[in-house]
């Protein structure tokens, strides 16, 4: 069964210190299970949405960079990314398995192009990246430094698990968490994990 492990909100920079400008906000959700998959949605409170695109990352270690490439391709519509990827993708690039549909050289060049991308689409783009506990993207956050978009990274600062749903995470030393009982509280305790980007 797949589990949603990361959310990226994509919108316009606001004049306030944080958040996104009201209006159209797009959302990418990463699901992990047998395989990883990024699903791109246009957020709407009025109707349920189906994904505008689904991209399967080339490999787990590049999942976040593949999301940034997906944003450059589908949301910003960067011309250089389109020129590099369109010859290999089905019309519109809505369903992509990166390691299969795209040659490795095209992926490498398109990632470089997305790093040079201006990330403007009716104004400056901003990303809010929310990796959940245990997400493969948690270890990849520093790659955001290579891109020109504004971003906020929201990491878990408190987590409560009741019963066995948190048992796998509770045993993980990666987050500096320890199990205490069947009701577990996890405060922000590990500066190495929760430190700056």
Image (tube, helix red, strand yellow):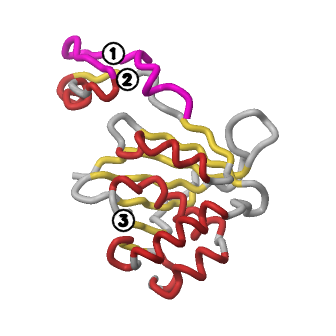
Select label 2 or label 3 by which is in front. 3
Q: Which mark is residue 134?
A: none
106 vs 22: above or below: below
| Residue 39 rendering spot, x and y as whole percentages | 44, 60
* Residue nearest the observer in this picture, 22 or 169: 169
Locate the C terminus and report the quarter of the image it occupies: top right
Which numbered disc, 1 or 3, marks the residue that appears first in the sequence? 3
Mark 1 nearby-residue class (10 Å; few <14, some 14–19, many ≥20): some
Residue extending furthest toward the right: 15
Q: Which mark is residue 185?
A: 1
Q: Which residue is mark 3?
A: 58
* Residue nearest the observer in this picture, 107 or 15: 107
Mark 3 nearby-residue class (10 Å; few <14, some 14–19, many ≥20): many
**Secondary structure category for the residue under label 1:** strand
Q: Residue at x 68, y 53 (%)?
A: 148
Q: Residue at x 67, y 64 (%)?
A: 117
Mark 2 nearby-residue class (10 Å; few <14, some 14–19, many ≥20): few
* Residue nearest the observer in this picture, 60 or 123: 60
| Residue 76 rendering spot, x and y as whole percentages | 66, 66
Q: Residue at x 52, y 42 (%)?
A: 142
Q: Which residue is mark 2?
A: 159
Q: Quadrant of residue 5?
A: top left
Q: Which residues are magenta?
A: 176-197
C-beta proximity under 8 Å, tags 1 and 2: yes
C-beta proximity under 8 Å, tags 2 and 3: no
- Gap between marks 1 and 2, in whole Å? 6 Å
């Amino acid at each position: 069964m797949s589990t949603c492990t990361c959310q990226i909100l994509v919108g316009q920079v606001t004049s306030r210190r944080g958040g996104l400008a009201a209006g159209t906000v797009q959302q990418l959700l990463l699901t992990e299970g047998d395989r990883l998959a990024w699903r791109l949605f246009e957020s709407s409170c009025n109707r349920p949405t189906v994904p505008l695109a689904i991209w399967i990352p080339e490999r787990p270690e590049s999942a976040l960079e593949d999301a940034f490439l997906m944003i450059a391709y589908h949301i910003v519509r960067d011309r250089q990314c389109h020129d590099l990827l369109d010859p290999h993708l089905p019309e519109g690039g809505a369903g992509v398995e990166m390691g299969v549909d795209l040659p490795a050289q095209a992926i490498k060049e398109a990632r470089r192009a997305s790093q040079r991308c201006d990330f403007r689409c009716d104004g400056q783009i901003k990303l809010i990246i929310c990796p959940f506990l245990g997400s493969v993207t948690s270890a990849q956050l520093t790659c955001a430094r290579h891109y020109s978009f504004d971003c906020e990274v929201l990491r878990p600062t408190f987590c409560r698990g009741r019963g066995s749903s948190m048992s796998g995470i509770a045993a993980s030393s990666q987050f500096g968490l320890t199990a205490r009982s069947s009701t577990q509280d996890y405060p922000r305790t590990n500066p190495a994990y929760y430190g700056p980007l």
